[in-house]
Amino acid sequence: MRSIFSSAFLIEMTNKIFILVSILLATVVLIVAYNMKNHNRRMRYFLGSIAFALGGLMLQIGGYTKYAYAMYSLAAPVFTLYFIETERDDEGNSWDGFFWMSLQCLAAVLSVIMVIFTGRGNLAFLIQFLIVIIMLLFSSKDLKSSIGFLIGSIFPVSACLAGLLNKDLRLMGFGIIMLQLIVFFSYQYDLERELMKNQVELSENKVALLMEQMHPHFIYNALQQIALLCDEDPSAVKPSIFSFSAYLRKNLEALTNEKMIPFLTEMEHVDAYVELSQILPSRKFELVKDFQITDFYIPALTVQPLVENAIYYGIGMSEEGNVIRLETKLEDGYVIVRVSDDGHGKRTSLPTQKKHNSVGTKNVITRLKILCDGEFILNKSDNGSEAIIKIPEFRAVAGDK
C-alpha cells in the first residue's frame, strides 16, 4: 500500500492547508496581543516572535520556501528572549539567560546557513527547539508554570521530525504558530492571576501606606508647633494650618486613588509636607528643584516618601549637609525622578529608623511596579544618598488617560 506521503499532490495540499490555517491563527493572535493594554518588554518580544513566524508563512505561501525557513530560524531566538523576560526576577536579574541566548543565536546562524546552501534546515531547527526544551527544564523557576511552554514545544519539534522523514513536508510555520498560540493562552492566564495578586497587594499596600504616612508623633508634633506659633508668630499659623490640611488630604486621597496622577499634583503634596516639616524644631534644609519635564503621570505618594527620607534620614542624621535636590528628566525612553541629599549617606541609622525607611521604600516600589511597571533605585555613599524612580515614557506620558 502506497504511503500518503508518496503523493506529491496530497503533500502540497497539506502544506498549503497548514500554511493558511497558520496565517489565520497568527493574524488573530497578533491582533489580540497588539491591542492589549500592557505592552511591556516581555510582550514586545512575543509580538516580535509572531511577526517573524507570520513573515515566514507569507514568504512560504508565495513560493519563497528558502527565505521563509530563514525567517523561521529567527523566531526561536526572539521567543527565547520572551522566556528570559518571563523568568527575570523581581530585581531585574536575568539569571543564565545570556548563555541560552548565545546558544540560540549559534543555532539560528546554523539554520540560516543550512537553508541557504542546502535548502533544508529541519535538523538545525530541531536543535533550536531542543535547546528551548532543555532551557525550560533546567532554568525555569517553577516548572509547573512552564507547562504551556513545554506542551507548545512539541509542535515545532514534531514539524522538524516530519520534515526529516519527508523533505517535501514543510510544516515548520504551523509548528511555531501552535507553540506561540499555546504560550499566548498561558500568558493570558498568568496575566489574570498576576492582576488578581496585584489588586490584593495594592489593597494591602494602601493600608500600610496610610499607617506609614499618618505618623501619630508627626501629627502631634505638627499640631503642638502650630499651637506654639499662636504666641510666637501668629502670622505663620494660618499658612501652617493650610499645609497641615493639605498633607492630611493627600494622604487620605491615596487610599481611594488607584490611578496615576499628574506629577505636579504629587508636587503639591511634596510642597505641603516640606512646608509642614520646616515649621517643626529640626535642622533647617533647602529643597532645590530642577525639572526638565513636568507633563507626565506618576503613582500617588511615591515622591513625598522619598523627600521625607531625605529630610529625616539623610541630612537629618548628619551634622553636615542641608540641601535636598529634586530633579526630573527624560532619558533613554524613561522618565527619571531623582531625590538626592548631601547628608547621611552610608552611615548606619538606628533600627527603628531603618524599619521606617524600608517600609516607606517598599510602598514606593510596590506602587511603581503595579501601577506603571516602574523601577526604584537607591544609591548611598559617604557623601549622601539618592533615590531614583524610572517610569517607561509611554506609561508616564499616557498615565491612565
Image (tube, rainbow, N blue to C red):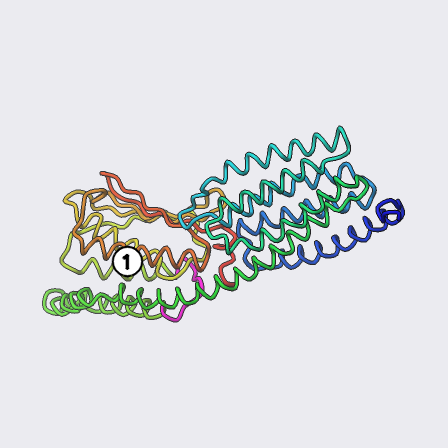
* Residue 47 x/y as whole percent: 62, 50
- Residue at x-position 72% and y-position 36%: 121
Give the residue furthest to the front: 1
Q: Is residue 264 left or right of residue 183?
A: left
Q: Quadrant of residue 73?
A: top right
Magenta segment: does it hold 256? yes
* Residue 18 x/y as whole percent: 78, 52
Q: How many marks?
A: 1
Q: Along the line of sight, which residue is nearer the eye, 283 or 78? A: 78
Q: Amino acid at mark 1?
A: Val
> Would you name the residue on which mark 1 appears?
359
- Residue at x-position 47% and y-position 54%: 396
* Residue 356 x/y as whole percent: 23, 57
- Residue at x-position 26% and y-position 68%: 242
- Residue at x-position 30% and y-position 65%: 208
Q: Along the line of sight, which residue is nearer the eye, 372 or 112? A: 112
Q: Which residues are magenta?
A: 255-265
> Crowding near pointer 1: few (<14 within 10 Å), some, many (20+)?
some
Magenta segment: does it hold 53? no
